[in-house]
Image: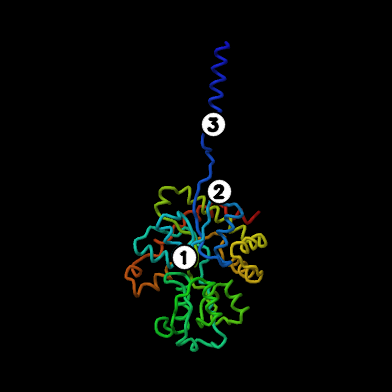
Amino acid sequence: MGIETRRITVVLLLFGLVFLAGAPSAAAADKINTSYISVAPSSSAIIWVTKDARFFEKNGFDAAVIFISGSVRGIQAILAGEIPIGEGGGPSLTTARLAGGDVIAIAGNVNVLPYYLAVQPSIKRAEDLRGKIGGNHIAGTTAEFALRVALKKMGLDPMKDVNLRVIGGSIDRMVALQKGIVNFTVVTEAGKAMAEKLGFPILVDMATLEIPFPQNGIYTSTRLIRERPDIVRRYVKAYVEAIHFFKTRKEESMKIMHKYSRVADRGPVEESWDWHARYIPEAPYAPVDGYQTILQDLAPTNPKAAQASARDFVDNRFVKELEDSGFIKSLYRK
């Protein structure tokens, strides 16, 4: 090889190295905004674990995890395109989809109504609720749905027999109960521990009824599934891995729950972990029967709900892929 040939070869090699150094990495993480809907130490903890235990990062995401208060706003953020994949609740998804919104459930987190009716000590039985003020969340949220269901189970008409007042999220409702602004409200398992500690008894335990219900899940658009199924597939995989971490590594998960919820007391956080570790499924399918529960509730006032099929509200293909491949079972054999 002559001097000139060697010189050309060196120049080409140097050019190649410079080009490779300046080129974007093929393994560069996808930036994504995702959301959680509750600051209570509850089912949103799976999103927190996915972030802090680095399962998003492991599956190729640079994820910004954003708090959006309430399932209605969570679904609205997905519909607006601000959040491509994020948390929400079944009632708000159902309402949005019936109205033509492009949003669908791809995973289910808690698939039963996990609520309790907390009351002032003077209320001993269902009849005592007549004429009383109930602390409610905004229309379309899971808490609002649960409160109506609880009242109906006790033979009370939510529209006539009580006065339901919109207060807000779980912590706001507990503060309103404590201050006497409301006489009763619904709380989740973390709120139950708090209510009992403050001297407010639980009149109804809805969790024991195991009513099929999409309390919390992961939602996206059919457009994203169609155009970028790889994004959805990797997100669901990260979420499934986070569920395994949560269910099998209690202390580390509770540390993350303390961080995001800012609840310092171990009692409510541990009780919440115990409940969710029991009820969150290893294979987090979005519950078709849960959407049927909602459609049946809406049918008397919404003709579209009466005609809709619950199966159209879910797309479980990504969870099914992970289960059929043996991936989920392999996590729990480790």
Q: Along the horizontal axis of the image, is 246 left or right of 19?
A: right
Quadrant of the frame with the N terminus: top right
Quadrant of the frame with the C terminus: bottom right
Q: Along the horizontal axis of the image, is 56 left or right of 229?
A: right
How far apart are the alpha carbons under marks 1 and 3? 45 Å
The kind of secondary structure element at disc 1 is helix
Q: Earlier in the sequence, mark 2 or mark 3?
A: 3
Up-down relation of residue 299 to residue 255 (above or below): below
Look at label 3 and name its amino acid. Leu
Look at label 2 and name its amino acid. Asn
Q: Residues within 10 Å of mark 2 (few under 14, many from 20)?
A: some
Q: Which mark is residue 20?
A: 3
Look at label 1 and name its amino acid. Ser
Residue 300 location (% of width, % of height): 35, 75
Q: Are marks 1 and 3 in contact (CB under 8 Å)?
A: no
The kind of secondary structure element at disc 2 is loop
- In the image shown, does 206 or 169 lie closer to the viewer? 169
How far apart are the alpha carbons under marks 2 and 1? 26 Å
Please give the residue where the numbered disc 1 appears in the rendered image. 71
Q: Along the horizontal axis of the image, is 91 left or right of 238?
A: left
Q: Residues within 10 Å of mark 1 (few under 14, many from 20)?
A: many
Up-down relation of residue 97 to residue 135 (above or below): above
Q: Quadrant of residue 253?
A: bottom right
